[in-house]
Amino acid sequence: MNDTSGGQRTARREEPWDFDGAELAFLAALRARAADWQVPWAPSQVGRPEDESSFLVHVSLLDEARRLVLAEWAVHFHGTHVLAGKVCDQLFNLHESPEHGFFRASGTVEELAERCADWFESLLSRPVVRVEWPFKDGKPASHWEFADTGEILATRGSVPAGGSSPAHRLPVRP
């Protein structure tokens, strides 16, 4: 996982020496697994949430052409267990439902890193499309979804209800 500083909101950026041995081992194992991934690029960061309750690793899916964050997923590492899922707010709280990929796991640092790396890779491997409808009242309407399931990630404008056919389905992430 690459540590980037762009787009940081409330997660405080940490220096490596601020992390304990288990956190550094977890991060090293994640990075080692990520080095072999065959997925499109996505920004990721490590740090702590504002309440400093966990070691935080999060990744964002972007529509780079539109300069838009579509969704974020995070892992909260607590040494012997993790909470992972889709981020629901700027404090990096998680949607705690399986529909949003939420899971809890316990184990060794290595086991947790492997489970989280597999989960991140699975997310980053999913294709994303932008679905566009004709202009209504002079304003475009779009939503972004996982192409494999139709799960909506983000919406912009007033998307027509009732199954109106979109004008375009454009790939954002292969």
Image (tube, grey):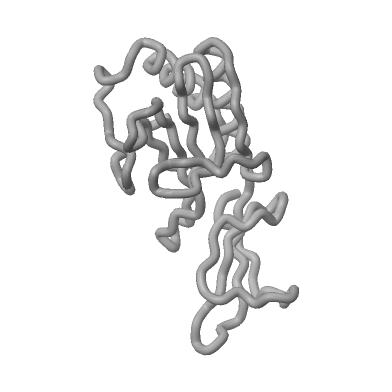
Question: For the view shown, which residue lies furthest in the right direction?
Answer: 163
Seen in the image, is 7 located left or right of residue 33? left
Residue occupying image coordinates x 50% and y 13%: 109
Percent x, y of residue 130: 58, 63
Of residues 119 and 36, which is closer to you in this image? 119
Picture layout, residue 114 above or below residue 155: above
Residue occupying image coordinates x 60% and y 81%: 134
Residue occupying image coordinates x 63% and y 39%: 101
Seen in the image, is 47 located left or right of residue 118? left
The N terminus lies in quadrant: top left
Q: How many marks?
A: 0
Picture layout, residue 164 above or below residue 96: below
Percent x, y of residue 95: 56, 44
Of residues 36 and 87, which is closer to you in this image? 87
Percent x, y of residue 41: 47, 41
Percent x, y of residue 159: 60, 74
- Based on the displayed image, in which of its 4 quarters is residue 6 positioned? top left
Seen in the image, is 162 located left or right of residue 95? right
Q: Look at the image and tell me whether residue 3 can be seen.
A: no
Seen in the image, is 168 located left or right of residue 12? right
- Based on the displayed image, in which of its 4 quarters is residue 20 positioned? top left
